[in-house]
Image (tube, helix red, strand yellow):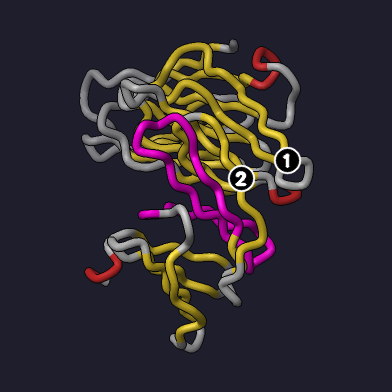
Amino acid sequence: MSHYDGGVYASGDTVLLAAPDGTVTAVNGATNKKRWSHRLPGHARPAFSSYGDGRTAYAVTTADDGAHTLVTAVDTVRGDTRWRASLSGNLTPAGSGPGGVLLLTETDTQTRTTAVVRYDPRRRTARRVALSAPVSATSAVSSGDRVYVLGADGGLVAVDTGREGSAQARLWRLETSVANASPLVVADGRLYFSAADGRLLAVDAERGEVIGETRRSRGARRGVAFWI
């Protein structure tokens, strides 16, 4: 896979392999046969997020100056472009939501996550939810309309992009005091991540509370949720 160190992504039964030169190759994950291979106009080294229909992927590339981000919806079986949109800001895909909406995080010039963006391709509208404070994010995941952002200092933020208004959309913030955390994983209403000291933490995604963790080092502090 070294030839495809631009990234490897899964969308349905298709595996997308991104090469450093921007060439994207789609492979049938069941048969290992190539479906198509070409570059996507405007995408030097695209990152991808998949939509739940199994044959749509969103290619995302930010301009060098960070002023705007190009999003292209690609048919992963045929390689055709379904639509393209240019969104303002330095955006990174976090996942997709109901009805094909694309969920992204926005980063400022100091590489801090400042907002969550919801783009609806059917309405061609983008809505931003500003975070109450910038987060030096390590990872972000989505589930339904919600996006969860984990900071380098262990701060975990939940945003519901389906709600109107930033105040209503910001659900909770949890301080876990976990440094150098692993990427977030969301499953069955819980968020999972590990700490540098080997602890595995489980957080209730609805309430923003730590509901379990493996043995931790002496003196570690349990997280406390603050409702915002």
Residue nearest the observer in this picture, 19 or 163: 19
- Residue 189: x %, y % from top left: 61, 41
Q: Residue at position x 36%, y 61% from top?
A: 22
Q: Quadrant of residue 104?
A: top right
On the rendered image, what quadrant is the C terminus found in?
top right
Magenta segment includes 184: no
Magenta stretch: helix, strand or loop mostly: strand
Q: Which mark is residue 85?
A: 2
Q: Report whether 226 appears left or right of 90.
A: right
Q: Report whether 139 appears left or right of 206.
A: left
The residue that mark 1 highlights is: 124
- Residue 183 seen from this side: yes
Q: Above or below — where is 192 with respect to 152?
A: below
Q: Residue at position x 50%, y 33% from top?
A: 105
- Residue 215 seen from this side: no
Extent of the magenta region: 44-73
Label 2 close to label 1 by CB (< 8 Å) = yes
Tell which residue pokes out farthest to the right in this image.
123
Q: Quadrant of residue 4?
A: bottom left
On the rendered image, what quadrant is the N terminus found in?
bottom left
Query: What secondary structure is marked by label 1?
Result: loop
Residue nearest the observer in this picture, 204 or 45: 45
Amino acid identity at mark 1 = Arg
- Residue 59: x %, y % from top left: 51, 54
Q: Residue at position x 66%, y 61% from top?
A: 82
Magenta segment includes 56: yes
Amino acid identity at mark 2 = Ala
